[in-house]
Amino acid sequence: MPSTSSSHRPRKKRKQEPTTSSSNGTVSLDPASRKEKPAFPLVAFFWPARGTSTSQWVLLPCILMTVGLFRWCTGIWPYSGFHKPPMHGDFEAQRHWMEVTTNLPITHWYFHDLQWWGLDYPPLTAYHSWLLGRIGALINPDWFALYLSHGLDDMDLKVFMRASVMVSEYFIYIPAAVICARHMAKTHHINSWESSVALTAILMQPTTILIDHGHFQYNTVMLGFVLASLSSMLAGRRLWSCVFFVGALGFKQMALFYAPAVAAYLAGACIFPRIVVFRFFGIAIVTLASFALLYLPLLLGTLRDTYRSIPLPADVILPPLLSTFPFELSEKAWYYPYLVQLAQSIHRIFPFARGLFEDKVANIWCAVHSSGLHKLNQYSSTSLSRAALGLTLISITPPCAIIFLKPKKRLTPLAFATTAWGFFMCSYQVHEKNVLLPLLPMTLLLASEGGMKAVIRAWVGYANLLGCWTIFPLLARDELRMPYFVFTLLWSYLMGLPPCSLSAYSSTAEGSGLHWTTKIVHLATYAAVLAWHCVEFFVPPPSNKPDLWVVANVCIGAAGFGMCYLWCLWTFLDESGLLIDLGLVESPKAEPGKKKQ
């Protein structure tokens, strides 16, 4: 007779052990009492949970509610272009794309009224705008009425648009950041308590909050896909990293800042330590399939509009890319409408005719031109684009070569950061808001081993606070001075950084490792920023040089960002072990009982 008792033995629930050891620099030793204490204020907020079995399901909701509250409070303030006709600003651009995508055939999206915030982002942004526009139209159709809603500054619309940024961020960016922080902790052997501290620092990044929830944009959707791609690399899921990175490119083309590092890492993973042909073909096929899936709705919409004989707008100008084909295209060919849509989307996504840079951005080109060191408007657009391409290749080749030769998962944040800094400093058509791209992977270093120690925290904080300062002229135009000061001072206080604290630069800082030249450069930059704010507030610029203070902002910012690039590159080279392999430095002796990473 068979036994009635089940043979299945349920898995024993693992007991969560309290963790008191620290390898991330969150804990310092009081020299007087010889007792452990928080290394900086942000850690103090998490101190009651240290050494206890507090579940992550308790800490995580508290973190998400807190960072969400700060985001929503930022949204109370004005946005880009508020009551500023005739073109208004980025808020109107995002609203207008919802108007276009919900009212016009899909074949008109990239052609309609290009002088009034014409759609110039990849298809995933268009689909996102369509979805939000459909939802918004259910609440109030007047918000997205074709032509009649231009420049609308309705307060209910503002609440809806602010909420759409929050919801989009909590669907994409926040989950990706949480998972990425956990993969970083696992890779670098960081306990969950320290990982929670690092996650909070990442989510409280002031520049990201001020641009998306103050100025108004959806950058965190693209950054969320980037984090998902990076997290997949850390987890060893290379094919999923391809899918997510295509999603980032499909939402905003500025994700191309990371593309060389992604390509170099994936190519290196197929070659080192041994050649894996099937992995290479798998990555290639999944990437191509992801791009095909990205453009599929656009092409299916084109098929539908072609079947219904819906013509393009009467004043349409066909994209220049069509003239580059080696054969003559027939307008009657079945494939012609699809080529037109693809060519127009690419033409709109890569606007080379706009110039080397827009507005005042703290990179090499704008600093050289605006400071009067050398005027670049004497050169043709072709010459400038070639120069930008050459200098960008020079800046990104070293990090790409390192990650190609040493395709280690733990090096990917440094590879992303260094490559993005190279693009930001040297590339063509850079906006001041593009500083978000190098700042994100650099801030992720806080979740690495020793990431909260002064040597890394000082550099990460320096880059973030300097980046926030360089967008101050943009925020000031949007009447966001108060949120700017609140968030920069709050983040500097929480991280124990100037101007609120000099603890990271003190000689007694735990594991400081900061060279005296680094301390001088950082503190001099902070002093210059404080002096600049005083001058900008109290002293009007000369009438013949109305942008003098903005130009000073650009020059100081570009110099500081150049040092951030060099620090990331040197740290990347040091962490990769290439210097040891080449015999340029001696291998450090392993500490007893420490795991080799």
Image: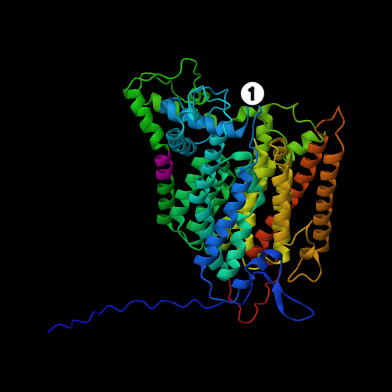
Say which of 587 and 287 sits in front. Answer: 287
**Tag 1: residue type?**
Pro
Residue at image position (81%, 44%) is 533
- Horizontal and vertical percent for residue 142? 48, 27
Give the quarter of the figure containing the N terminus.
bottom left
Is residue 266 among what the camera can see? Answer: no
Does 320 appear above or below 55? above
Q: Which residues are magenta?
A: 288-294
Residue at image position (66%, 60%) is 573
Residue to which mark 1 is pinned: 86
- Corner quadrant of residue 383: top right
Does 130 appear above or below 32? above
List the single residue furthest toward the top. Answer: 314
- Horizontal and vertical percent for residue 49? 59, 72
Q: Residues within 10 Å of mark 1 (few under 14, many from 20)?
A: few
Say which of 39 and 48 sits in front. Answer: 48
> Magenta stretch: dominant SS?
helix
* Left or right placement of residue 144 versus residue 48 in this view: left
Across the whole image, how many numbered discs are drawn on residues?
1
Does 504 appear above or below 106? below
The answer to whether residue 136 is magenta is no
Give the quarter of the figure containing the C terminus.
bottom right
- Horizontal and vertical percent for residue 221? 52, 46
Say which of 583 and 535 sits in front. Answer: 535
Say which of 463 and 65 sits in front. Answer: 65
* Left or right placement of residue 220 versus residue 136 in this view: right
Residue at image position (34%, 28%) is 303
* Left or right placement of residue 511 versus residue 177 in this view: right
Is residue 212 among what the camera can see? Answer: yes
- Horizontal and vertical percent for residue 475? 70, 40
Residue at image position (68%, 33%) is 358
